[in-house]
Amino acid sequence: MVVKGCHITLSGLRFHAYHGVLPQEQKTGGSFVVDLQVMGDLKKAVYSDELTDTLNYGTIYELVKEEMMMPSKLLEHVAGRIGQRIIDTFLQVEMVVVTVTKENPPMGADLKGVSVTLVLSRDE
């Protein structure tokens, strides 16, 4: 068996946070959803069955939670902080795809949400 690649996906992480440009958004907050795909060299875990050889998705969740609790005006800024934090924390991470969705944004439109997706890779 040859492992060609690996990624860990965290889907539908829900948060109440205070991101937005409008003062009301910063005061009352809103509902946000974060989806992540974290790619890296996790081949060792396929054979070892050891947590130390993979990415601990509990730790990833805690990092995302911390970043979501720091208010930003723009979703791009939030997504960039999340991706950078994951890359900085886990040496085996090569790429992160981060989607941050603001549910029911205050723009007078009937829509489920607005999302920003960033694809970030390690600088090397």
Image (cartoon, grey):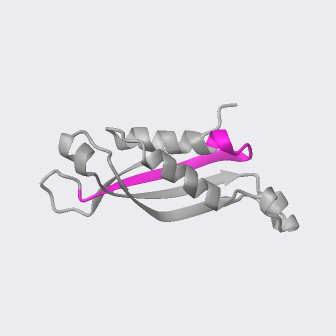
Q: Nearer the viewer, residue 8 or 81?
A: 81
Total number of numbered discs in the rendering: 0
Could you say where residue 116 lies in the image, as x and y percent from the top left?
Answer: 38, 48
Specify the quadrant of the image occupied by residue 85: top right
Q: Quadrant of residue 62?
A: bottom right
Question: Is most of the magenta stretch helix, strand or loop?
Answer: strand
Residue 71 in the image: above or below residue 2 = above
Residue found 50% across the figure and 39% down from its top: 81
Where does the image place residue 77, in percent across and percent down from the top left? 41, 38
Whether residue 44 is visible, yes or no, is yes
Q: Which is more toward the observer, 64 or 9?
A: 64
Which quadrant is the C terminus positioned in? top right
Residue 100 shown in magenta:
yes
**Relative side of 97 to 70, left or right:** right
Position of the N terminus, as image quadrant, is bottom right
Residue 23 place in picture, x, y as percent: 20, 40
Q: Is residue 90 left or right of residue 67?
A: right
Q: Residue at x 62, y 61 (%)?
A: 58
Location of residue 40 in the rendering, given as x and y in whole percent from the top left corner:
70, 51
Magenta region includes residue 37: no
- Residue 75 vertical placement versus 32 (above, below): above
Q: Residue at x 18, y 52 (%)?
A: 106
Residue at the limit of the structure toward the top, as seen here: 124
> Residue 37: in sight, yes or no?
no
Is residue 31 shown left or right of residue 96?
Answer: left
Residue 44 location, quadrant = bottom right
User: Which stretch is magenta?
Assistant: 87-104
- At a point 53% along the width and 56% down the height, the residue shown is 36
